[in-house]
Image (spheres, rainbow, N blue to C red):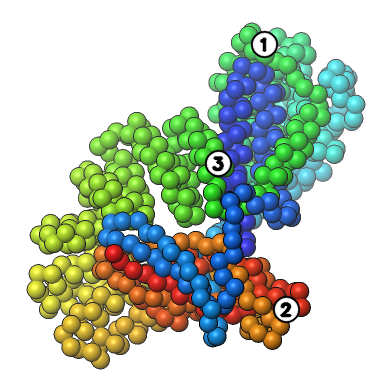
Amino acid sequence: MSAWTAILLSAALKSTVVLGAAWLLAFTLRRRSAAARHLVWTAAVAALLALPLLSVSMPALPIGTGPLAPLVSSIVFRTTAVARAGAPVSADPQTAPAPQPSSTHAPRRPDFRLLIPLIWAAGATLALAHMAAAWMVMSRIRRTARPLNGSPLFPALAQSLGLRRDVALLEIPSGGMPLSFGVLHPAVFLPADARQWSDDRRRVVMLHELAHIRRGDLATQLIARAAVSLFWWNPLAWMAMREFVKERERAADDLVLTAGESATAYASQLLEIARSMQAVPVLVSAAVAMARPSQLEGRLMAILDARTDRKSPGPRAPLAAAALAVALVAPFAALQAQEKPDAVIQPAVEATIRAAIEQQNHDILDAAAAAYANTRKYDAAQQLLESSLTIRAKTSGEGSSTYAAGLVKLGDLSARRGKADDAVDFYTRAVALGDTAETAPALTYLATQSLTKKDPIAAEGFIDRAIAVAPAGKAAVQALTVKGNIAVANGLPGVAELNYLQALAQAAPDSAEAAFTMETYARLLDSQSRTGEAEALAAHAKTIRQALVKQTSSRFMITDPVAKVGGGVSAPVLLSKSEPEYSESARAEKIQGTVTLSVVIGTDGLAHNITLLGSVGFGLDEKAAEAVSEWRFKPGMKDGTPVPVTASIEVNFRLL
């Protein structure tokens, strides 16, 4: 994983904690004023905006993980992954000195991890560009707008709210929604037809927009929009923005009412404005509109409820809350979770679950579970997916395709963890609800497990169903390959060869699916003494695996001269490691062997420049690279200065 990928994933995890804490605090303040709850959301979006910057700029504060004794002082490192069919992986790290070093690295997930920073940056750039465009449009409108003069009402209202700075009153075309805009030089925009409004309506509208300016809402609006632009992919961020806007408008309403306006008259005017006028969507990214129909019902109920707490803090309170939130989140942003982050993860998980249950939105939990699974926090991912399944059952029913999709996700997680029995249970329940393209991998997994248990009849039934619902694509390649394995088990090598050839015809030429089919097909050819053909296929598969291992790295390549141990250069020392995982295809095919990687251990203590030297195939090469990419080293030193050093890493995969 690249440094930027690590930073972004860390910020994603920490943002979940921040937003979860904000949801909890806002919930506890549900009987307090809207202004108090708006302060909570202002603090939350300010903390979100600060998280990535603080994570990059502040020195790391590692979470305590117990003693981490250096494991090696050599440049050859070894680790062993041991697994049973259907059992989780365990690892036995070892190290041994050797005279011959090499160079390489391998990060975690293949090209998916490489794309994370690019996708994040593209989405954030588009969102920020939208925000900038709205600001430019509003700036142009302000330059061309005509002043609305002639009435002493506007300055009198500003003075009644305690505004000491000048606020311009400008005119926009008829039918537009009243707006306020500008941070240093604020202005209120009224439509041209405001000249024909009653005095009561003009007073109410002016009071509301001036209330936004007094509260500092124009500045906090920019903070919130910028935060959501950075975390555009996170549903929790958008829900937080919705709550931010809702509480902001209610707080402005409360300020109008405490200024002496009648609740009934104000509600009537607000309803009429919302019905007769419409805000331009692009403008609300930069300006603050008076009324949105989607929020109107809740606002009217709050306005007419005499029991509502309408206390309002001072005009500097929002910015003070934002500054306090940034100060509080700074130590948290500097944390770097290491081997035992459960104490940090669990509150985030629980907060995410509470937010999703409140919204009845299982997508929130699925996205969070995927993030935790990709960082191997499987218990957290399991908890999130189980809660997601509960929401699916409540909203769609236990016989729905939505519920089946939740079962498939739980099955996928169990399969990844090596818990075959759990995976079979979830997949069986999912496919019992109907066969779809989404259940094709589940059917293929069930076929593989049936074949492992020497039940080719059941295996063939499952695989035929998989091919029927997924006749093309990756799922079809995997299914046809397993169908070939079933034919081998049934003593039909000719049929198996036909299935393998069909799979290769459908597979992308340099894909992992193509490599798996080639490796499986090569074993059949070797058993038939067709050695030349088998070796050619195996060599082609190895070439694909080498490329896949290289793609796994999203870390920059080291092009500077690389040192070798000796001559004043000390060897790197392994400080922490991630255990390698057994791939499901290798477990099913009972594959064992040693993957040899060549790495360059950089001055940052990470592995770079991935090269696959010794291949085992069946997904184990990539699994070895993923694990090694998470290892942390004390870099090699020369004359007291860290230098990049070559090293070899051997990952042994053994089945018990």
Q: Which amino acid does label 3 sit on?
A: Ala
Which label is found at residue 638? 2
Task: Classify residue 472 as left or right of residue 557.
Answer: left
Of callouts 1 and 3, the N-terminal one: 1
Residue 126 in view (yes/no): no
Q: How far across and down, in percent of the image, does residue 221 sit?
A: 71, 37
Q: Residues within 10 Å of mark 2 (few under 14, many from 20)?
A: some
- Left or right: residue 179 compared with residue 521: right
The residue indicated by pointer 1 is 263
Which residue appears at 78% of the width and 34% of the height?
A: 319
Q: List the residue tagged with mark 3.
A: 343
SS of the residue under disc 3:
helix
Tell me if I can see residue 428 in this picture.
yes
Q: Disc 1 to disc 3, how far (Cα)?
A: 48 Å
Separation (CA) of disc 1 from disc 2: 76 Å
Question: Nearer the N terminus, badge 1 or badge 2?
Answer: 1
| 326 to 70, vertically: above or below | above
Give the SS element for disc 1. helix
- Residue 366 appears at what percent x and percent y? 43, 45
